[in-house]
Image (tube, helix red, strand yellow):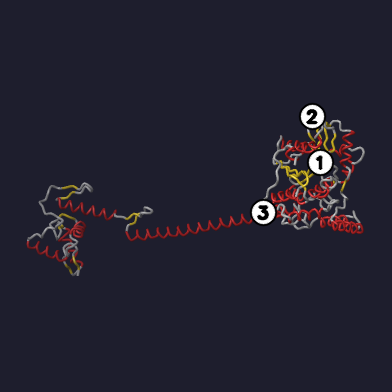
Amino acid sequence: MLVCDICGEEALLEEDMKTHLLLSHLEREISCPLCPIAGLSYDEIHFHINTAHPETDTQAQAKQVEVDKNKGQPGALSSRCIAEAPDPKRVCTSLGKGRSSRCVLELHLCRDLNASEILIQSYTCPMCALVCSDRFVLQEHVELHLQEQDADRESSGSDLQLARELQEEEQLRLKMEESKREAEDFRKLQRQFGLDGSGGYVRQAEKSMERAVSRGHMTPVEFHRKKAEMMESLASGIDDCKTRTAGVMSALYEHYVREGHDVVHVWLSAETDHYSCSEGDRGWGCGYRNFQMLQSSLQNMQLYAPCVSGLVPSIPRVQALIEEAWQQGVDPQGASQFSNCLKGTRAWIGATEIFSLLTSLGIRAHIVDFPQPSGAKNTHPHLFEWVKKYFSYSASRGAKLPPRVVKTTQPPLYLQHQGHSRSIVGIEQRRNGSLCLLLFDPGCPPEDMRRITCSNIPATSLRSLRKVPSLLAHKQYQIVAVEGVLSPEEKRVSTSLLVKGQHPEIPALSASNVLCP
């Protein structure tokens, strides 16, 4: 059964329906079966019925209206259309189409506007401004955005975690490299200062003699003989004096009395022997050798002789004496730097260890610090002035005009700077007022020092002793000066000062503040 979409007419055959449409709707004016609207095309009346009468049963009312038409009775007007007399032809301003009545025009506008709304009705994504034709499609699209955001957050979180892990790995790597570098630097310092456990005086002397044998400079018989002599000397604790040069101070005094007229004044220390480094302590034994020089002078003085033994100790014995001073409580901080152990090592010692050793022996001493240059070009003129006052103080007491050459009763001074130490045994004052120190250097070979003891001292030999201010250009210097014997109370005070990590200091550079008890 076929039904007309316009009027609801039923037909059995398709040819009958086509005939009905042609006769009833196409050849005559088409009108709405539910309201008096007429003069519309087939598409317009179809759109009108679907939009203006959606709540009405189309087929039932179509039959009722058809019956009414046959009877000449018009159907009721739709609530959305108002029946009125035909007005003058109206024109649609949007499409320019003419309509015969207001109702027809309203229907046309309603149809066109609804169609436009249907055509332009869209849904815009609030996240990317994408236009969707359906709200369900929009919802799926927005959900994809949210999923991407979640994935981005997870990816961002994982990237951040990865960056943190990489940063931690880099920091750990740098820390390990720094630790390795510090450990290597520490090992270098240990090797430099003889604390690497590679052996001490005995081991270094044996290696030196073994190299001499391998090079053919020493026979095996001579090797064993020298080794036996060395072990015997070390067992006694007395230096074998093979590197000692005596009589240098007397030779210098005679030289200045006889010659050196370009020098206005010369002050020399008390008699002091020179001790050179041997094969067993070459490169690290300067501090020990300077102490041997100091003791060689002190042991010949009546004031200090009871404090020191009659013979100069060997280097291993000096190490043992410093350890004994630490055991007495002197300078625990310094002892901790050497792990309270010096024997059997090649450890360097400095002014603090010399001070500790002298204090343990009951000898009063002071450490005078020159922490920074006091003159141009990193020179230390204050140091030279202080040394002059030290040697000239005792010589000038009671003398209106001191002699040109003075051999004082003052012990030599221990001079320490970075990497090396020497002994100050005198000072010259030239005609132009400049000062020049006279130094005993443990690095000077015994052969060179023995040339000074000759009747005619070569100028080159004196040049190795003289040091003008420009040749002492290290940043910092320290001097250990011996000034008398400690009483038991003074020894206790000096020990307690070092226990607290302090050193007795000289208030000023004036010799009166230093030397007067």
Whole-angstrom CA distance, mark 2 to mark 3, is: 50 Å
| Residue closer to the observer: 244 or 312 | 312
Among the 4 quarters of the image, the one containing residue 172: bottom right
Q: Is residue 440 above or below residue 77?
A: above
Residues packed near mark 2 inside 10 Å, few (<14), some (14 to 19) or many (20 plus)? few
- Circle 2 — which element? loop
Contact flag, marks 2 and 1 (Cβ < 8 Å): no
**For the residues bearing labels 1 and 3, Cβ distance under 8 angstroms:** no
Q: Quadrant of the C terminus?
A: top right
Q: Cβ–Cβ below 8 Å for labels 2 and 3?
A: no
Q: Where residue 368 is drawn, which disc sits there?
A: none
Q: Earlier in the sequence, mark 2 or mark 3?
A: 3
The answer to whether 145 appears left or right of 71 in the picture is: right
| Rendered location of residue 21, percent (x, y) | 18, 62
Q: Compute the Cα span from label 1 to label 3.
A: 45 Å
| Closest to the observer, 277 or 438 | 438
The amino acid type found where label 2 is placed reads Asn
- Tell me: residue 164, above or below residue 305: below
Q: Which residue is mark 2?
A: 432
Check disc 3 and give the amino acid type: Glu
Q: Earlier in the sequence, mark 1 or mark 3?
A: 3
Give the residue number, with chain letter if any, for mark 3: 182
Quadrant of the rendered image containing residue 211 = bottom right
Instruction: Please state, as top left, top right, bottom left or bottom right, where the N terminus lies in the image.
Output: bottom left
In the image, taking residue 307 as reference, residue 83 lies left or right, namely left
Q: Is residue 108 above or below residue 430?
A: below
From the viewer's perspective, is the residue at label 2 or at label 3 nearer?
A: 2
Alpha-carbon span between mark 2 and mark 1:
26 Å
Report the mark closest to the observer, 1 or 3. 1
Q: Nearer the viewer, residue 23 or 61?
A: 61
Residue that numbered label 1 is attached to: 410
